[in-house]
Amino acid sequence: MNARSPGPGQTLFSFVRHWSRRQLSGHPSESSQQGRIVLVTEAVDSLVLRGEPATVNAVAAEIGIDQSGASRLVAAATKSGHLVATASANDARRREVTVTAAGRSLLTDAHAWQERVFGELTADWSEQRRSEFERSMSELIDRSRELDSGGAL
């Protein structure tokens, strides 16, 4: 490996940086706000699907930001009607967040857009290559979660 050919780790993190900076279509400030609401709504949905309580701290860990930033994102998505916060069934002092019907609709639209973008980016790929890429990404995410829960990363 030389300075002109990065290793797979560098390529992975370059990929993450590239996609974390992309904006949705539309006005940049509107797009950024909508993107943040999608981000936090997807985080809550992902936590709930994994059977984990969607607290602000869990959302912060899921997104990789601090608790105060996650709190602001949850508040904005709650204000916009995409999330709702309620007292935890296990501990009334703790608030848990769930996705509302409007949030589900938002996720349906966002996921359709994500599939369209993936389709456009991989239009000249075979179905096998698409499937292998998707499987590889899923394996990386699963392994990262395993390492995170064991404290290795």
Image (spheres, rainbow, N blue to C red):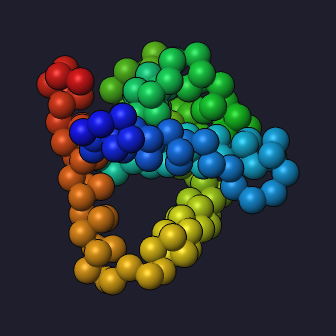
Check the image and report above or below for 15 versus 74: below
The x and y percentages for residue 136 are 24, 58
The reply to whether residue 108 is visible in this rendering is no
| Of residues 91 and 130, the one drawn nearer to the viewer in this rendering | 130
Q: Would you say 60 lies left or right of 84 here?
A: left
Q: Would you say 15 lies left or right of 111 here?
A: left
Check the image and report above or below for 140 versus 119: above
| Of residues 21 and 139, the one drawn nearer to the viewer in this rendering | 21
The x and y percentages for residue 37 are 64, 44
Check the image and report above or below for 85 versus 104: above
Q: Quadrant of the C terminus?
A: top left
The x and y percentages for residue 57 are 44, 22
Q: Would you say 98 lies left or right of 13 here?
A: right
Q: Quadrant of the N terminus?
A: top left
Q: In the rendered image, which quarter is residue 144 located in?
A: top left
**Residue, x 51% and y 17% (percent of image)?**
67
Q: In the rendered image, which quarter is residue 101 located in?
A: bottom right
**Residue, x 44% and y 46% (percent of image)?**
15
The x and y percentages for residue 6 are 33, 40
| Of residues 124 and 3, the one drawn nearer to the viewer in this rendering | 3
**Residue, x 19% and y 42% (percent of image)?**
143
